[in-house]
Image (cartoon, rainbow, N blue to C red):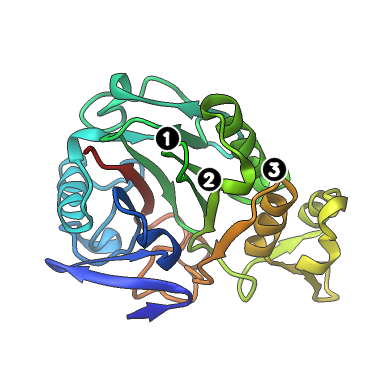
């Protein structure tokens, strides 16, 4: 089944999305979770994958086990980010397996993860912000970055491209990048201070990614903004999922739609061994 430009899968009651452009690579597993298929009750129903919303840790861990089995990830290889809308990017490997899951977080302020180690499953968290996926098929390296409006105007996508260049020798033109589910241009209303920060991105023609509502508010297209930032950084293979989290409350938790009483979704990527 299609939603936007992504594929929606269901296995053992768990529903998740993938990009057709990334599915074609053997040994690469990626996904974006939905709220379907877990054990959490009430406002967290049912596949809540965020430990910091008020759901029990036992429920969240069981949800991760269910999700990993369905989507093909190694639960023992999970490594979590620690997001706070900044742009610190972290390379992780064998030593970080379990961080944020079976082991405490060992760092704060991590809005992006990268690795070239098979069996390490990268995990970043969402409830309207933009997940950015990166894969280097030549160097066999992967990355995820969390781009809310603050991360977007701070060009976290470009910074991850440079991080992959420095860490793995990646050529931006060889990278495959994808913009995942988040609040879409149909639903993302911002105020003048945010508009001004976006307009400062002069090289990407920022006026074209906003619509003036003539009431002091603006509709912002974070998908296109991030796509243009990545293109400016030299990425040529770009996909946009075109899935709005606020428009699909049956599938996603949305901060704009639900406020604080909600669960959260994740983006995940892993290189398989062998």
> Which quarter of the image is occupied by the N terminus?
bottom left
Which residue is labeled 3 in the image? Answer: 155
Disc 1 on helix, strand or loop? loop
> Height in image: 173 above or below 20?
above
Give the numbered dot on residue 81.
1
Q: CA distance from mark 3 to mark 2?
A: 11 Å
Which one is closest to the eye, mark 3 or mark 1? Answer: 3
Q: Residues within 10 Å of mark 1 (few under 14, many from 20)?
A: many
Q: Nearer the viewer, residue 70 or 58?
A: 70
Closer to us: 11 or 126: 11
Residue annotated with mark 2:
146
Q: Residue at x 71, y 51 (%)?
A: 229
Percent coordinates x, y for residue 79 in the rendering:
33, 33
| Residue 15, quarter of the rendered image | bottom left
Asked whether the beta carbons under mark 2 and mark 1 sit within 8 Å of each other, the answer is yes
Of the image marks 3 and 2, the number of the one nearer the N terminus: 2
């Amino acid at each position: 089944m299609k939603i936007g430009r992504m594929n929606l899968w269901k296995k053992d009651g768990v529903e998740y999305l993938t990009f057709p452009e990334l599915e074609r690579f053997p040994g690469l597993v990626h996904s974006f979770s939905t709220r379907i298929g877990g054990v959490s009750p009430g406002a967290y129903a049912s596949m809540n994958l965020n430990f910091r919303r008020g759901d029990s840790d036992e429920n969240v861990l069981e949800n991760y086990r269910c999700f990993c089995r369905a989507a093909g990830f190694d639960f023992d290889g999970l490594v979590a980010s620690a997001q706070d809308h900044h742009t610190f990017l972290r390379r992780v490997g064998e030593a970080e397996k379990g961080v944020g899951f079976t082991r405490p977080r060992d760092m704060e302020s991590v809005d992006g993860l990268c690795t070239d180690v098979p069996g390490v499953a990268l995990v970043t968290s969402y409830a309207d912000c933009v997940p950015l996926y990166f894969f280097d098929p030549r160097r066999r390296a992967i990355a995820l970055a969390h781009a809310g409006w603050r991360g977007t105007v701070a060009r976290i996508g470009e910074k991850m491209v440079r991080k992959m260049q420095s860490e793995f020798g990646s050529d931006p033109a060889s990278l495959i990048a994808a913009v995942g589910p988040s609040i879409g241009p149909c639903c993302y209303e911002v105020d003048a201070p945010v508009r001004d920060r976006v307009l400062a991105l002069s090289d990407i023609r920022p006026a074209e990614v906003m619509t003036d509502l003539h009431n002091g508010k603006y509709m912002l297209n974070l998908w296109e903004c991030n796509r243009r930032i990545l293109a400016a950084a030299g990425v040529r293979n770009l996909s946009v999922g075109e899935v709005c989290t606020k428009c699909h409350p049956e599938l996603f938790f949305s901060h704009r739609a639900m406020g604080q009483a909600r669960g959260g979704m994740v983006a995940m990527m892993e290189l398989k061994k062998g």
